[in-house]
Amino acid sequence: MENVPKEDGVLLCCNHISNLDPPLLGSYLKRNVHYMAKRELFENRFLNWLLTKLNAFPIRRGMSDKQALRTAITLLKENHIVGLFPEGTRSKDGKLGKGLSGAGFFALRTNAKVVPSAIIGPYKFRKKVTLVYGQPIDFSELKERKASAEEATQLIMSEIQKLINHNK
């Protein structure tokens, strides 16, 4: 938890293995975490209420959702935490998938600290689940040479994979 800044904007990037990941990811932090969630979830009245209480905002998957991008950038610039699952969906086999370019886009477009995170272990009765917050990633070199969002996302994903490998 000491790796998550207490005041700055933070992009909290994590692997995604279960529907329980968002509440777990933010549960140990003293600050509220705002999440992007697929728009379809907001169509159910109960889920809409619950997700809104959990500081989630909708994103249309599979396309560039300018409103969701603006919302996330504004939150980061206002020194909030935005929790993001760069894979864009839950992993079917528990392995880390390819990250979408959105995480890299936010990392390069804001001054938010990017904190890689990992959830390790199955959500099963009597099984241990570990949550790890890694050191913030330094993006100064990538910003300086105007790297692509894809390259920035690859760096984030490699840091998440290191956390998974180190904590198995």
Image: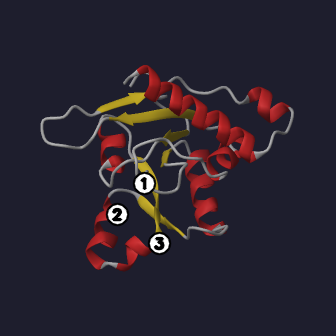
Q: Secondary structure at mark 3?
A: helix
Would you say 95 lies left or right of 19 here? right
Would you say 71 lies left or right of 132 here? right
| Circle 2 residue | 51
Residue type marked 2: Leu
Q: Vertically, is 33 above or below 168?
A: below
Q: Give the class, few, some or many, for how many residues have Cα within 10 Å of label 2's Cα (few <14, many ≥20).
A: some
Q: Give the class, few, some or many, for how many residues have Cα within 10 Å of label 1's Cα (few <14, many ≥20).
A: some
Residue occupying the far right of the picture: 145
Residue type marked 1: Arg
Instruction: Tell me the CA gap for discs 1 and 2.
Output: 17 Å
Residue 164 appears at what percent x and percent y? 44, 29
The mark nearer the N terminus, 3 or 1, is 3
Instruction: Tell me the CA gap for discs 3 and 2.
Output: 11 Å
Of the residues tagged 3 and 1, which is closer to the observer? 1
Residue type marked 3: Arg
Instruction: Tell me the CA gap for discs 3 and 1.
Output: 15 Å
- Name the foreground residue: 119 vs 48: 119
| Circle 3 residue | 39
Residue 124 appears at what percent x and percent y? 19, 43
